[in-house]
Image (cartoon, rainbow, N blue to C red):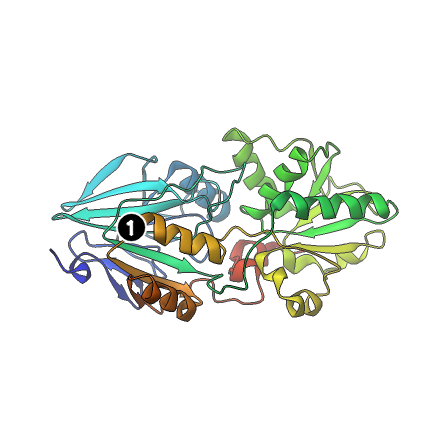
Amino acid sequence: MIAPDQLLRPTPAGLYCPPGDFYIDPMRKSARAVITHGHADHARAGHERALATPETLAVMEARYGKSFCGQRQPLAYGDEVDINGVRVSFLPAGHVFGSAQAVLEWKGLRIAVSGDYKRRRDPTCAAFEPPRAHVYVTEATFGLPVFRHPDDAGEVAKLLESREAFPERAHFLGAYSLGKGQRMIKLLREAGYDRTIYIHDSLEKICALYDTGGVDLGSLAPFTGAKAPRRGFAGDIVVAPPQTLRSDAARKLAAPVACFASGWMRVRGRARGRGVELPLIISDHADWDELTQTLSDISPEEVWITHGAEDALMRWCALNGLAARPLALVGYGEDETGDEAKVDVADNARSV
């Protein structure tokens, strides 16, 4: 058996594949990058060549402009490409629109890199598919037993109940512009909310991509900009990046109810610290049960943990007969003030 480090190894620039001469989600500009999804801590502009799902490439163009890389290489789920003798394919990760797990195969060794993922149903993206792998590289954003996310429908019901109880107030929902915002809108539609939902301008292009991809988000209208109505949005739901919860625009709303959809809302101190009146525990990352179920389903010979709470998951692996090692990669999900510990550069640049 080939040693896993011969196929994939951690470096200061990210996970590097020596025989293929490419990086996965590199943190620096590279000659060839394999991108798992469009969030800014995984998808950076400036690579000479970028391999990703067509949806992720479209997201990167919407966020960074048409010249975000030198050459694009779209790869659909289930298709395969040979890079210097390494076979590379994508499986759905269930994280956000277009998100993928990267599966590498070389000389009989298979390594699957999760990127970010979740197992629960999400009506806005393809569902997670467990890969076959000798080595599984997993995130562990919520890798502690305390993080067990509740049912999404119950959290959405809290938002709708609050709106019914306080029709004179605007409900200002903090949700990231890629993934969480669209998922919250779709969950509201599934719960029967058919009124216009007002969105921050940073969500507009991404929502349009979802619509093109067959995800119907219903009636949307701008909350900011020249086309926005000049009123307090009493009785309405406004979706915007979480860092705008304390912005001047938010303060002009009608007695706004500050809401925040995030797995971190399980931690009461985080909700209080951000001034969140209505915390909603809805995450685009796997919780503890999903992480451990995934490792049980895949049953790899070895587990590598890229970022998050490694210690508890390492202990779980040891108790369940799985060899595991932390990679201690820096640069992924390191902003603890953000949703799901994300660094959302595009939203920060366009906050109102």
Farthest residue toward the right? 168
According to the image, label 1 marks what residue? 112
How many marks can you see?
1
Describe residue 208's horizontal placement relative to residue 231 as left or right: left
**Location of residue 142 in the rendering, given as x and y in whole percent from the top left corner:** 49, 61
Of residues 264 and 333, the one drawn nearer to the viewer in this rendering:
264
Image coordinates for residue 263, horizontal then vertical, percent: 57, 57
Give left or right: position of 42 versus 12: right
Q: In the depicted view, which residue is nearer to us: 107 or 73?
A: 107
Q: How many C-alpha atoms fall within 10 Å of the one at disc 1: few (<14), some, or many (≥20)?
A: many
Please state, as top left, top right, bottom left or bottom right, where the N terminus lies in the image.
bottom left
- Vertical placement of residue 183 versus 256, above or below: above
Q: Is residue 282 above or below residue 213?
A: below
Q: Quadrant of residue 89?
A: top left
Residue found 19% across the figure and 59% down from its top: 4
Q: At x 71% / y 44%, what residue is drawn?
A: 157
Q: Three-letter amino acid code at disc 1?
A: Ala
Give how far across and how far down residue 133 sits, in percent: 25, 49
Relative to 70, residue 327 above or below? below
237 or 154: nearer the viewer: 154
- Apparent side of residue 309 relative to residue 253 in the rendered image (left or right): left
Tell me where residue 74 appears, x and y as whole percent: 33, 37
Whether residue 231 is visible here, answered yes or no, is no
User: Residue at coordinates 22% horizontally, 39% vertically from top-left?
Assistant: 81
Q: Which residue does the image show at 52% across and 40% down from the upper left?
A: 121
